[in-house]
Image: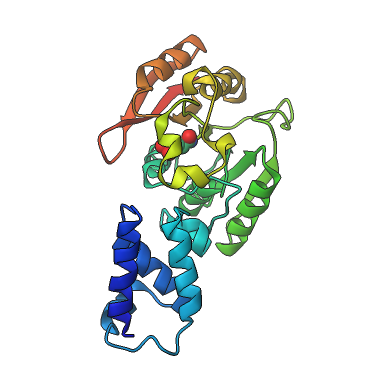
Amino acid sequence: MRIDALLARATARLAGAGSPSARLDAEVLAGHVLGVDRTWLYTWGDREFESWPRARFDALVAARADGRPVAYLTGEREFWGLSLETAPSTLIPRPDTETLVETALARASAGEGALLDLGTGTGAIALAFASERPGWRVEGIDLSEPAIALARRNARRHDLAVRFRVSDWFGALDEDERFDLIVANPPYIDAADPHLAQGDVRFEPLSALVASEAGLGDLRRIAEAALVRLPPGGTLLMEHGMSQGPEVRQILVEAGFRDVETRVDLGGRERVTLGLR
Ligand code: GLN
């Protein structure tokens, strides 16, 4: 069968199974199996697929039709232009989170400084930041050992000098460790949110998604513990759900932060709230 016909068939199967991105999924999976990019697939669509690893492609399409996230099937996802290894032990990096990186960079001098990424997962935020600020000391912590091992592999993959270690929020840090910027994309979804039963999130670790207090528990815990870890003028930035802006601003103000404000993501939704010590 020709590549274009095979892609059309896989697309129809994935669309029938309810994938919101069937064509893209089929292309990414075919590109992964063949070791080529999507442009190649368009250029060589009239080639026969016979000699290609067809069984492997069919197995990936079947897994995707069962709902498995493409990033777990291919084992990678691009974030901030960096190809990152992904695994079911961590959240899949999302485009929304680039808003957090942009906001952190806007507050980071070109010279030196120190940034801490709480709940780093794949290491996406810490690595994206480090790729733009080579003079900064960048650290990422996560409660999950597999996540830290994954983040370290991602640092090696891009030759970025980020230190990753296991810690329950600030728990494993020395008492005198301070950072100019502290960033976090913590769990912030309410356990009763119906979105948890839909799409890719069904396969992601609940510990990276769900928080107590209708999703605000970890945001509050981080805000309360972060202030003493910042020098005067240092900034805390946290990602949160699109309807949590007012509550998160209140949490930061109550925790003692000043100049508290919220930034919107590319879709115009309140996504990142920051405050200064
Ligand atoms: N933004 C993610 C989602 O809506 C949640 C990420 C998180 O809880 N930190 O699926």
Say which residue appears at 46% left-offset and 43% top-offset: 201
Please name whichever residue, 185 or 275, is drawn nearer the observer in this view of the structure.
Answer: 185
Q: Quadrant of ligand 1?
A: top left
Please name whichever residue, 47 or 8, is drawn nearer the observer in this view of the structure.
Answer: 8
Query: Hey, which quadrant is residue 4 in on the image?
Result: bottom left
Say which residue appears at 54% left-offset and 55% top-offset: 86
Whether residue 121 is visible, yes or no, is yes
Is 142 displayed left or right of 99 in the figure?
right
The image shows residue 188 at horizontal and vertical percentages of 48, 28
The image shows residue 269 at horizontal and vertical percentages of 29, 32
Q: Is residue 211 above or below residue 24?
A: above
Total number of numbered discs in the rendering: 0
Please name whichever residue, 202 or 187, is drawn nearer the observer in this view of the structure.
Answer: 202
Q: Is residue 255 above or below residue 85?
A: above
Whether residue 82 is visible, yes or no, is no
The image shows residue 85 at horizontal and vertical percentages of 55, 59
Q: Is residue 66 above or below residue 206?
A: below
Is 2 displayed left or right of 159 in the figure?
left
